[in-house]
């Protein structure tokens, strides 16, 4: 080994080095001799760090973002526990900003127009939900379809959310509210009306509502309860950025187990619905409606194949193929997945906002009694909901003021020239934001104030470009009419049957991000029956 002792001298002046310079084999042997495994690893590490930084800067280009990336992981620790204030800081930093976490380069769009551009650019982007969603929902799930395949699949589902179809599910909606409002009253009485965080109970209510409207009574009471209990594990597994593989006993692992349980339950429900609908049963839930549409299509196809003349009036609105029990279960699961967190968030804010604004709640109550001609036991129907102009304004203002889904992750599938100067590279995640559009002062003056009147006497209804609460473009929310109608039905009925009190804390107005947004203190409430 070269051992130049003493002061700094030229290696060639060292008698032990000179001969090696003219003996290549000896030199390589010497270098290799000094090149220990540690030196090799350190060199590789430094190379990887430099490559990681270089790649980040290459992808970043003119986009606003941190000057350097924390080697490899980026701000991973922040994204494990995302804070609303951090998202807000990103939105405020510019209309396009970026961050890189592990191998993922993420671009966040804040302005309404940038967000709309992403939602409406299916040539360049497709929804990516979050990495873990592929593992939980299954890679073959329809929500990951793109282009024509997605449009065609979705056409077959549109019929499940028409007005006529929604009317069939309204009795389920009412039954679930009856059951859960009673639970709210019992649970509150059981703790002597002490303030209790109600967000978990709202999540349970919304899971039960989803299960009953989606799969009716094919699912047992116990199974509904199990899904309601375990669903938060699925949400917890769906953070924006997760560790790339599912390790035992991690959030994604528990989430996957819960998702498999839900899929199994929905598959069993599908088998029961197929048998009941084949025997001529009435449509009572979304699952029945879809199974019936498939069975009607099969009969139609069979007649055509046999050459039996079929009148145009007998042709189903959409001629569907047959779907396996598992495929149907997977699709119904996407409805639960898409609705659960968003409707739970909307419900929590709605109850909190109403309790904090008794004058507005009183108007909701007055309207609900009036449209029921003074009989508060009148059942919910779409016709009744149509007459609730004020209650609808309250629901829409809640969704604007606290949009449950603040951001929608998309994946760039082809280099995306989003502005003249910026092209977002293929493989990046790109996220249109909803919050800044619904808090845009130009569209909604006094945007940080809760004012339902803006939907009645103001021009909020005309600000369609800013109404990104349910997305826009080819993937806009399939369940939006159902969601708005059931929220109107819920708060109207609750206003007639219960009094509830909110116990504000210093954190009630702070926003917690748990897939969707909730009050940081989980909304401390109590409930009492109304005489
Ligand atoms: C307040 C409640 C809800 C909110 C705020 C909400 C919001 C959203 C948003 C922002 C998207 C993404 C749209 C886009 O990428 O352009 C979406 C998609 C979707 N939502 Fe909702 N949603 C709600 C309730 C529901 C309900 C109740 C259902 C089902 C019954 C549902 C089913 C879906 C489906 C299936 C998609 C994906 C559509 C596609 O990819 O074609 N959502 N929703």
Image (cartoon, rainbow, N blue to C red):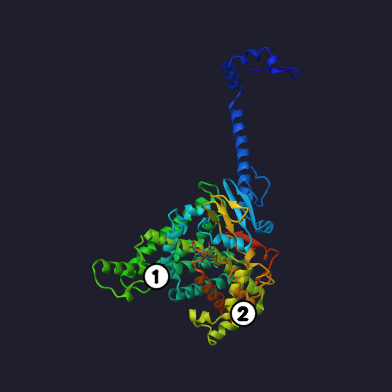
Q: Nearer the viewer, residue 112 or 187?
A: 112
Residue 26 at x, y percent in the picture:
58, 16
Quadrant, the N terminus: top right
Q: Nearer the viewer, residue 375 or 105?
A: 105
Q: Nearer the viewer, residue 23 or 444?
A: 23
Q: Nearer the viewer, residue 28 or 336?
A: 28
As displayed, is residue 372 above or below residue 117?
below
Residue 148 at x, y percent in the picture:
43, 60
Q: Give the spatial CA distance, label 2 vs label 1.
A: 34 Å
As displayed, is residue 185 above or below residue 52?
below
Residue 341 at x, y percent in the picture:
54, 63
**Residue 525 visible in rendering:** no
| Disc on res. 456 | 2
Residue at image location 63% in from the left, 48% down from the top? 61
| Disc on res. 289 | 1
Is residue 205 shown left or right of residue 512? left
Is residue 1 shown left or right of residue 166? right
Residue at image location 39% in from the left, 70% down from the top? 289
> Going from the N terminus, do you reach mark 2 or mark 1 first?
1
**Residue 142 visible in rendering:** yes
Q: Is mark 2 within 8 Å of ligand 1?
A: no
Query: Within 10 Å of the Cα at label 2, are there few (<14), some (14-19), or many (20+) other Cα atoms?
Result: some
Quarter location, residue 279:
bottom left
| Disc on res. 377 | none
Quarter location, residue 262:
bottom left
| Label 1 residue SS | helix
| Label 2 residue SS | loop
């Amino acid at each position: 080994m070269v051992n130049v002792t003493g002061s700094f001298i030229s290696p060639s002046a060292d008698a032990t080095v000179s001969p090696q310079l003219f003996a290549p084999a000896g030199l390589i042997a010497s270098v290799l001799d000094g090149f220990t495994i540690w030196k090799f690893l350190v060199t590789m590490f430094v190379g990887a760090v430099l490559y990681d930084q270089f790649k980040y800067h290459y992808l970043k280009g003119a986009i606003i973002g941190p000057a350097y990336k924390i080697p490899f992981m980026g701000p991973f620790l922040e994204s494990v526990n995302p804070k609303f204030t951090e998202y807000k800081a990103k939105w405020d930093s510019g209309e396009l900003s970026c961050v890189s976490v592990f191998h993922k380069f993420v671009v966040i769009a804040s302005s309404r127009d940038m967000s709309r551009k992403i939602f409406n650019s299916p040539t360049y982007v497709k929804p990516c939900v979050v990495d873990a969603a592929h593992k939980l929902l299954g890679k073959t799930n329809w929500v990951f379809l793109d282009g024509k395949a997605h449009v065609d699949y979705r056409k077959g589902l549109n019929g499940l959310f028409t007005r006529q179809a929604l009317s069939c599910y309204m009795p389920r909606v009412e039954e679930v509210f009856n059951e859960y409002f009673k639970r709210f009253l019992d649970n509150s009485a059981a703790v002597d009306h002490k303030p209790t965080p109600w967000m978990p109970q709202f999540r349970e209510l919304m899971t039960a509502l989803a299960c009953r409207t989606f799969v009716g009574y094919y699912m047992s009471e116990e199974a509904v309860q199990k899904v309601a209990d375990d669903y938060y594990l699925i949400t917890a597994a769906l953070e924006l950025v997760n560790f790339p593989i599912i390790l035992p006993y991690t959030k994604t692992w528990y989430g996957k187990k819960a998702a498999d349980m839900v899929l199994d339950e929905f598959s069993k429900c599908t088998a029961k619905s197929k048998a009941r609908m084949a025997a001529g049963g009435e449509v009572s839930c979304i699952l029945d409606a879809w199974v019936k549409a498939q069975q009607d299509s099969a009969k139609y196809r069979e007649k055509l194949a046999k050459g039996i003349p079929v009148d145009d009036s007998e042709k189903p609105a959409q001629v569907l193929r047959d779907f396996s029990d598992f495929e149907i279960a997977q699709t119904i699961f996407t409805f639960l997945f898409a609705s659960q967190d968003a409707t739970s968030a909307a419900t929590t804010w709605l109850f909190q906002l109403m309790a904090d604004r008794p004058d507005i709640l009183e108007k909701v109550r007055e309207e609900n009694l009036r449209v029921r001609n003074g009989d508060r036991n009148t059942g919910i129907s779409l016709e009744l909901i149509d007459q609730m102009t004020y209650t609808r304004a309250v629901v829409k203002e809640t969704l604007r003021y606290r949009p449950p889904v603040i951001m929608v992750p998309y994946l760039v599938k082809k280099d995306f020239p989003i502005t003249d100067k910026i092209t977002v590279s293929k493989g990046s995640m790109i996220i249109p934001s909803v919050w800044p559009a619904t808090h845009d002062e130009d569209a909604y003056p006094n945007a940080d104030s809760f004012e339902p009147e803006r939907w009645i006497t103001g021009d909020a209804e005309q600000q369609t470009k800013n109404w990104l609460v349910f997305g826009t473009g080819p993937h806009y929310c399939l369940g939006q009419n159902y969601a708005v109608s059931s929220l109107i039905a819920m708060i109207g009925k609750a206003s007639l049957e219960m009094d509830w009190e909110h116990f504000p804390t210093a954190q009630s107005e702070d926003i917690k991000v748990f897939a969707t947004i909730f009050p940081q203190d989980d909304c401390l409430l109590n409930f009492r029956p109304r005489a």
